[in-house]
Amino acid sequence: MMDHSIPYGHQYITDDDIQAVVETLKSDYMTQGPRIDEFEKNFSKYIGCSYSCMVSNGTAALHLCAMALDIRPGDKVITTPITFVASANGFRYLGAEMVFCDIDPRTYLLDLDKLEDILRKSPYGTYKAVVPVDFAGYPIDEEKLRKLADKYGFAIVVDACHAPGASFTDTKGIRRKVGACNYADMACFSFHPVKHIATGEGGAVTTNNPKLYERVSLFRTHGITKNPNLLTKSDGGWYYEMQELGYNYRITDIQAALGISQLKRLDWSISRRNQIAEKYDKAFKDTSIHTPYREDGITHAFHLYIIQTGQRKELYNFLRENNIFSQVLYIPAHTMPYYRQFGWKEGDFPVAEDYYRHCLALPMFPTLTDEEQDWVIEKVLEFSRR
Ligand SMILES: *Cc1c(COP(=O)(O)O)cnc(C)c1O
């Protein structure tokens, strides 16, 4: 028996991370200081986008994208049911009518053919935005989605909270990082402790569109600006204007210092996660356990390693008895009591619901030791031999 429990995900904080926080605490700034600019610059450079806007969490990032797009009550927005509910909520805050669309049974991402079936039935511009989720770390086909966006007239906001460091190859043969927004309008990230970069709470919006960036930045800080190019008049050095009703969705310098330090380890973390995934793949190869699909030309960020099995609840309980805390992600959003009030119900999305009945996320984080992973594998195999 393992003498300690193994969670499905865990943050990794090094002495360098701690040192970076201590230095910030000794500096003049706790918030709104130089670490935030630095984190934004480094993140943009890593991702390959023009602008990053660091915010207080991933949900705020989604809400800010919706505000930047000027989503109004009744506007229709499409997302996937297999996601954390925040993907839908960020738009719902502004009164959007959330429309769900079933998933691809291989990748578990928004099914772009089914999406087109929905889009085809309504005139151009009926749907204001589509919010695909790079679920578990698997990048959506953004290029194909861009073609649909141009044909049917909607904005693309990628919920990339699971996928910093993931990439795909487009039809030009060029590698594109998730969040680089070569095809999407904006992308959102989260720096919650279970995600790749852990700042406690934290998030980011990335874009290449200066107008959208300006609006996201404005709404992040109360709708207040001091930018001389945006002011309606000038007065003195103190002068600022509140031009829109915004929020306080800022991140702190303390958190940004953590983010800067951890961003340096992101590539290492992604490759370690892929190493763990390959070991799981191999171990379950000759069993009835279904392992995650990957297409050539993509890099999976492996926020989650999800298997599908016929005896999900039994396996979940068996692993718990052995100190292994696997997790079920996600309960389909359209079956949540809140979203049921709009008429969504069980049976609406058979692929997503079938996925939910069988899915289980096994421990996946970069500091999972070989010994711990061997224990997980041994127990899963022991269960499947019963
Ligand atoms: C974590 C997460 C969010 C929300 O991020 P927070 O930082 O927790 O607000 C949104 N979407 C997805 C898919 C997530 O996993």
Image (cartoon, grey):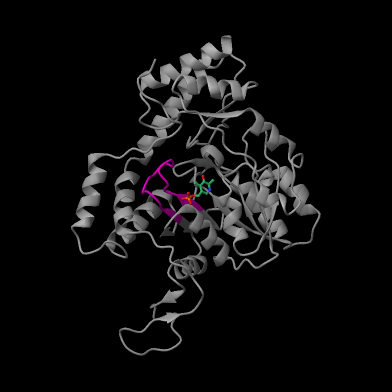
The N terminus lies in quadrant = top left
Q: Is residue 284 above or below residue 364?
A: above
Q: Nearer the viewer, residue 281 or 379?
A: 379
Q: Residue furthest top?
A: 386
Whether the magenta-drawn stretch holds residue 234 is answered as no
Q: Is residue 192 visible?
A: yes
Q: Nearer the viewer, residue 184 or 346?
A: 346
Q: Is residue 180 visible?
A: no
The residue drawn where x is 48% and y is 41% is: 166
Magenta highlight range? 188-204
Where residue 255 appears, x then y in whole percent? Answer: 33, 53
Q: Is residue 346 above or below residue 283?
A: below
44 left or right, relative to 86: left
72 left or right, relative to 276: right
The residue drawn where x is 73% and y is 43% is: 113
The residue drawn where x is 36% and y is 84% is: 239
Quarter of the image where one finds residue 9: top left
Label the magenta part by its dominant secondary structure.
loop
Where residue 175 appears, x then y in whole percent? Answer: 49, 43
Whether the magenta-drawn stretch holds residue 203 is answered as yes
Q: Residue furthest left?
A: 26
Where residue 72 appears, x then y in whole percent? Answer: 65, 68
